[in-house]
Amino acid sequence: MHDPRVEHINALKRIIRYIQGTLEYGLYLYPSSTSMLVSYTDVDWASCPDTRRSTSGYCVFLEDNFISWSAKRQATLSHSSAEAEYRGVVNVVAEIYWLRNLLLELQCPLRKASLVYCDNISAIYLSHNLVQHQRTKHIEMDIHFVREKVALGHVKVLHVPSSNRYADIFTKGLPRQLFIDFRSSLSVQPPPARY
């Protein structure tokens, strides 16, 4: 930063305090079957005050193990929250497809459809509806990519209730208790007690 201010220093101090308080935390993986990928996606629409680009986030679980995540600003400007959310769905479906191929190469093919949980009804509708609307022509390639995976039965895009929106942790500030609950749900926790 070329011109740091007091609020920037305060934010940095808060981050350092958080890191110091969670040094022993880690991501723990446990034995489980490899039969299903489940993902959660969320977008904070037009959240960047300078560019008005949206921030996308997702997390992917292989059974109960948290194996992949992302949080980044979208490359293009979205004209609606539905478009931004749909681009978030596209990102996670691309990740799921890559993971499915990786598991196939590792001789662990997935037999069930991977689940994508999204909190935007319009984005879910776009992934299932085969009618192309004039308002969505500019995201037509993304729509066809996800629809193809849904039609093949590799992916199901479903609505997620607010209590399970784990991807919110990647896109927005959360109240303390909700942040702690979601962090724990993502298997980020202190090491297990040793006997």
Image (cartoon, rainbow, N blue to C red):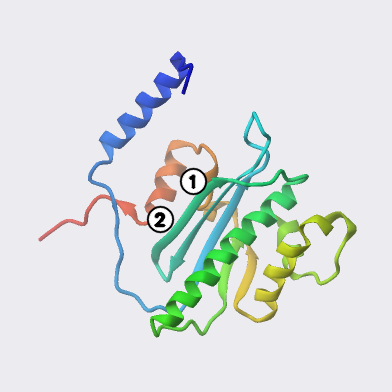
Viewer can see residue 118: no
Position of 162 relative to 17 (above/below): below
Position of 136 relative to 168 (above/below): below
What's the residue type where badge 1 is placed? Ile
Query: Cβ–Cβ below 8 Å for labels 1 and 2?
Result: yes
In the displayed orientation, state which residue is furthest to the top. Answer: 6
Residue 54 position in % (x across, y down): 64, 42
Q: Counting residues from the N terminus, which is met first, the one under dot 1 or under dot 2? A: 1
Q: Residue at x 30, y 68 (%)?
A: 30
Distance, label 1 to label 2, CA atoms, is 10 Å
Q: Residue at x 63, y 72 (%)?
A: 156
Q: Nearer the viewer, residue 31 or 143?
A: 143
- Judging by the rendered image, the residue that carries numbered circle 2 is 186
Other-residue count near label 2 (Cα within 10 Å), few / some / many at <14 / 14–19 / ≥20? many
Q: Give the tally of numbered discs.
A: 2
Task: Please give left or right for residue 27 compared with residue 60 in the image.
Answer: left
Q: Residue at x 70, y 79 (%)?
A: 151
Under tag 1, what secondary structure? Answer: helix
Looking at the figure, which quarter contains the C terminus?
bottom left
Q: Quadrant of residue 116?
A: bottom right
Q: Quadrant of residue 157?
A: bottom right
Residue 177 position in % (x across, y down): 43, 40
- Judging by the rendered image, the residue that carries numbered circle 1 is 169
Q: Residue at x 54, y 40 (%)?
A: 172
Residue 189 position in % (x across, y down): 30, 51
In the displayed orientation, state which residue is furthest to the left. Answer: 195
Q: Nearer the viewer, residue 117 or 96?
A: 96
Viewer can see residue 30: yes
